[in-house]
Image (cartoon, rainbow, N blue to C red):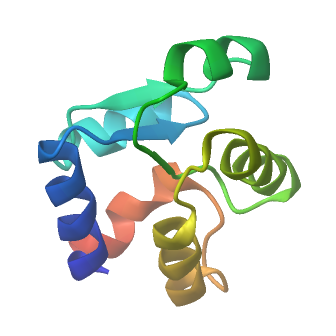
Amino acid sequence: MEKLIEEMKSRDEDGWIVVVEGIKDFEVLKDLGIKNVYIFNGYRRAFSDLFGKKVVVLTDYDEKGIEIAKKLKEVLNADVEIMKRIFSLIKKDATKVEELKHFLEK
């Protein structure tokens, strides 16, 4: 898990933007040292705000989050692999980004 967070930090330093679903997710990533975090608030605005940028998606691993990730990948060529790898490690225990902090504290 720590390796994946470090990969996101590295991308953050390279100007990538991490897309999350809500303020709690935003706060967790900020606490982890990730600065370029964008709160998803609808497709039209996201497409406009993020077009042409390097984007990593880290939405919740539930129906809504997966749908957002698929659409952002399709339209913006966003990276969803980090999200998949993170949740493949913890999906039995958590499906929300805001819960990641608990796994890093263990």
Q: Tell me which residue sits at (12%, 45%) in the image.
A: 13
Is 88 or 75 nearer to us in this picture? 75
The image quadrant where one finds the C terminus is: bottom left
Spot occupied by residue 2 in the image (x, y as percentages of width and height): 22, 77
Spot occupied by residue 21 in the image (x, y as percentages of width and height): 61, 35
Q: Tell me which residue sits at (79%, 45%) in the image.
A: 71
Is 90 or 86 nearer to us in this picture? 86
Q: Is residue 73 left or right of residue 18?
A: right
Query: Relative to 36, does residue 48 appear above or below in the rendering?
Result: above
Q: Is residue 55 left or right of residue 14?
A: right
**What is the quadrant of residue 101 in the picture?**
bottom left
Q: Is residue 53 left or right of residue 39?
A: left
Spot occupied by residue 9 in the image (x, y as percentages of width and height): 18, 55
The image quadrant where one finds the N terminus is: bottom left
Q: Tell me which residue sits at (78%, 57%) in the image.
A: 66
Query: Relative to 94, does residue 69 appear above or below in the rendering?
Result: above
Q: Tell me which residue sits at (52%, 52%) in the image.
A: 58
Q: Is residue 31 left or right of residue 83?
A: left
Direction front: furthest residue: 52
**What is the quadrant of residue 40 in the picture?**
top right
Query: Relative to 32, does residue 17 appear above or below in the rendering?
Result: above
Q: How many marks?
A: 0
